[in-house]
Amino acid sequence: MLLDMLKFYTRFEINDVTGNSLTDHDMTQLHYKKITSLQRAVFAKFSTLRIFALSNVASVDTRESLEKHFGALDADGLKQIATFLNLVPDEAVEPFEWHRLDEQFLRELLIMRHEKRCSQLEALNEMPLYPTEQIIWDENVVPSEYYTGDTCLALPKLNLQFLTLHDYLLRNFNLFRLESTYEIRQDIEDAVSRMLPWQSEDGDVVFGGWARMALPIASFAVVEVAKPHLGEKKPSRVRADVGVTLSVRREIKEEWENLRKHDVCFLITVKPTMPYGTKYNPREPFIPQVGLVSVRGCEVEGMLDANGRVIEEGPEPRPMLPGEQRSYRVWLDSNQYRMDMDDLQEGADDVYESFNILMRRKPKENNFKAVLETIRHLMNTECVVPPWLHDILLGYGDPAAAHYSNMPNQERTLEFNDTFLDYDHLKASFPDYELKCEAPEENRAPPYRLTFEDVPEQRDSDTEQMETEQSSISKSIVVQPYKYEARGPYPSDKPKQNCIRFTPTQIEAIRAGMQPGLTLVVGPPGTGKTDVAVQIISNIYHNQPNQRTLIVTHSNQALNQLFEKIMALDIDERHLLRLGHGEEALETEKDFSRYGRVNYVLAKRMDLLTQVQRLQEALGVSGDNAYTCETAGYFYLYNVMARWEKFQSQMLAYSNETDMSKLCALFEAEFPFSKFFADAPQPLFKGNSFDDLMGIAQSNFRYISDIFTELEEFRAFELLRTGLDRSKYLLVKEAKIIAMTCTHAALKRKELVNLGFRYDNILMEESAQILEIETFIPLLLQNPLDGLNRLKRWIMIGDHHQLPPVIKNMAFQKYSNMEQSLFTRLVRLGVPTVDLDGQGRARSSICSLYKWRYKKLSDLQHIFERDEYKHANTGLAYDYQLINVDDFKGVGESEPNPYFYQNLAEAEYIVALYMYMRLVGYPAAKISILTTYNGQKHLIRDVINARCGNNPLIGWPYKITTVDKYQGQQNDFILISLVRTKAVGHLRDVRRLVVAMSRARLGLYIFARASLFKNCLELQQTFKLLMQRPLKLCLVPAEEYPTKRLTSETPSDDVCKTIENMSEMAQFVYELYMTKLEELKKTLPTEEEMQAMRSQLPKDDADDSDNEASAIATEANEEPPQKKVAKDNTKKTQEAFKPTPIVNEIHVDEPEMEEQQETEGQETDAPTTEQETAESKPEAS
């Protein structure tokens, strides 16, 4: 395989002299040139090879025909031809004495040089995109997770530079395909091993277990093999029907029935040799244990109804199908089917006759086929990258070439809108510049228009002239305050304003983002990356109203955070669009999906037409002018504009009038739209001059004019009749800010390009977490215009000191460097970055645990001023602490399954501290529990479930998840379990440590084996600080939340309690809980008092209050806080609130584990009153 890679790169499609990329046509021409020069040499030297010399190229350029023609020649004859072509020297003398001239070498040289090269693109187009069993378990192709780094692997690498864009895409294609294959291998091994396939007595297969993600196949039949397209060998389409029996739990049945169109499944054949009752051993090889024979991928078209027709997805509810038998229509891979049929002709088994397992995958991890298709499609089209980006993407040239200061179209004057809060803020934001402002001090209110005098007005190609220009330019800014155009007389017409006082580095990032070119912003934790991104988007929106901006992030959660902040700024919501499935999680009643925006436009249109009707009545015009957008447009032209122009000409005659009361009365009387604005604050006209009054009139007319401008934009929605057409129009024409995840961009690229999608700017959040190829694809979501890409700005915001993209296979991660994001590569190449340097998230002491990793990171002023930072953490002696956890009953870390690490002592200790914090008064929503391993996450959830999950006094914390999943999130108090006691494990990666230490705002408590982690060289900077404080948990039990104690006060020894170990903590919490319970019982009314209160209420109200109390108790009892918030937000309706009991639910990351736990939890009856639930005591360890 290494030899094949060497062969491929020796003949790569690149000009060896210029370095330019060569097309398939160029390569064919070069091949013809070589063959014809060989034919000329043969014609001149060997009359015996006259047939070869006179044959057409296609008949002689294969290895077989060349071997046939040159096989008869001896070494001398071969040497003559090679010498004629200047391939070898005449004699093996100095300096060529090392040269081989033997017959075997010369023949191979001539054949290899002149045989037709297989086109890499053709091979790629004929390649099946689904992996088969031959690739999945081939250690040479997909190395196992035990890769040590000692050996060389036949894998492509991603480093700093690439030969051409084709090379860049090809390496990413191969690595993405292999990484997906590795994940598929893990999923297949997990699902099939759970099903426990055994051999029955009659030699058939019997399944001893079950799996959530796999089912036995009841029937399989290929139903259609369509004819190949012209010029192709593969069938144009292969469809099959798969029958399964859904005799599983209801929620799993729903998951199978909800398989969507284009979901990928796998068809598996197992022929086990193991008898009944054989246990599966995960440490033994997988294939011999289960007898796996074949694996084929397929793509779901849909579930079949009772008549055998595919049930189409749409707004209508799905038909209810009787029984448990279900059939799915699937598309098979045409290339793979053709290869299998060719093998069948040569005597191989028919794999399509023997499938007995259907496996699905989690939707979030199952988009590999669509991404591979997108990359393949990109390789088949001419990729046009903006010329200012091309060399930087390939890793050549000046890394700073795309920085705004080096761009030929750098803008000299910028309007910063609401970026600055006042003139002092502006002055502080540009410490290196001299500010020039002609306006008097009292008129220096924002917004400001800034002209940077160090930007030359015109770039000259003469370098010397440029240098003299640069030296003579002063580093100063001309400041021009200007006023927003008033939009109408109503208070709601005032624009929303930014209220964040940005730091100088944030202002530099905003300025760079507004300029054309490439902007890289490095944002350490808590430095306001999202706020900077939102302000850049807002400024581009106002400064470049005709440009469209694409927002791309790694996760739906980050996209929703960004979107919620964008909605709070002065951006018209009709220009906002959110693509993908994450918009359901937006914390707003508004729907920003495609169909939600279409409905908004239609509703807004009706609202505007109602206003037109009101205006028509106010003006006393007859007719049906508010019927459509078109009739409203004519009404504006002939009635509204005419009256406005007449009013303007009338008023100009009074421009010199000095009597203001008379002038106001005149304006009130003559203004044609006064009646329309009767509901606005009165009087309409008040001012100190004619210009003021005229400004008010223009502002009111602008309000009316905006109505008709919007209606003109909405006119297309009247002409387009279907929701699909309207949503396409909205995406391509109407929306100015379009947001999506990088995965959605990769999945939908073809669809977006075909629609004619266009955009001018890209802003990427979480750039350091996005795979290289998934960062590159959003650059090419549009067709080039006249051979050029219209992209003007590319803003990337991220932090390469935090966790990189998730790559599960160690060989691809380390050897192939696949975990390197494009953001990180550009930073390594030396592309200029703006490093944000002011953090406003964590206490200064907590920040010191990770700020050593950054060049410069200081605290913002509010960290020292706000009360929450001044006060200590209630009941805890320190704001951060490393708590040493020893073995419990001789056991530290355990590993029930490979790489599934758990530590019971740490899990019990961390839950005990959480319970203590809840008992002294901390809100559950302010506490998150993190860990470095999935196994520990599940163990902590189990411990919470057993100890306090169903207890209304304690309940569930905000989140229990892994450090990796919690990147980009924060909470006031973080409890972390580091799990390992034998080896440091993957926390050795400093980027993971930075993420773990930077999630907390006010309190961070780390449970770990101190002796292990303190000696780790990579972690020493942080653990030196942690080791300076006691390694035993120090409590201040007498305090109640919130405490009045300041962080500067050290509690005395007599109020502090030092906890020696986990068992002592568990006992202490148990005793504290019992004390609290007794106190609570004293405050509760007796049964007689309850009866008396009930008798005083009207009968119906009493019943209602009982139900409500019961429901609230159940909700408090069983619902994690973040779920409650999400549910409350969905209940913001006009109807009366009716509380309903909510079933026990854990915040889930991985559906299988949690839903299984939920179902078990639901089987027990929840207590009905607060007193009953309070008495269900937590278990003492």
Image: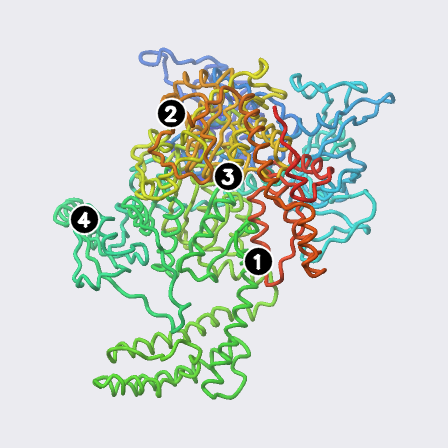
Q: Position of residue 738 (x, y in %)?
A: 47, 54
Q: Quadrant of residue 291?
A: top right
Q: Nearer the viewer, residue 851 or 580?
A: 851
The amino acid pointed to by label 4 is: Tyr
Give the residue number, with chain letter if any, for mark 3.
921
Tag in front: 2 or 1: 1
Q: Are marks 2 and 4 in contact (CB under 8 Å)?
A: no
Earlier sequence position, callout 3 versus callout 4:
4
Q: Quadrant of residue 1093?
A: bottom right
Earlier sequence position, callout 2 versus callout 1:
2
Give the residue number, with chain letter if any, for mark 2.
1022
Q: Residues within 10 Å of mark 1 (few under 14, many from 20)?
A: few
Tag in front: 1 or 4: 1
The amino acid pointed to by label 3 is: Gly
Mark 2 to mark 1: distance in Å?
A: 45 Å
Mark 3 to mark 4: distance in Å?
A: 51 Å
Q: Position of residue 465 (x, y in %)?
A: 14, 48
Mark 3 to mark 1: distance in Å?
A: 28 Å
Give the residue number, with chain letter if any, for mark 1.
1132
Q: Going by the image, does 1 lie left or right of 454?
A: right
Q: Residues within 10 Å of mark 3 (few under 14, many from 20)?
A: some
Tag in front: 3 or 1: 3
Q: Nearer the viewer, residue 310 or 480?
A: 480
Mark 2 to mark 4: distance in Å?
A: 38 Å
The amino acid pointed to by label 2 is: Thr
Query: Which numbered dot is residue 433?
Result: 4
Secondary structure category for the residue under label 1: loop
On screen, 83 above or below 1178?
Answer: above
Is any atom of residue 695 visible in this view?
Answer: yes
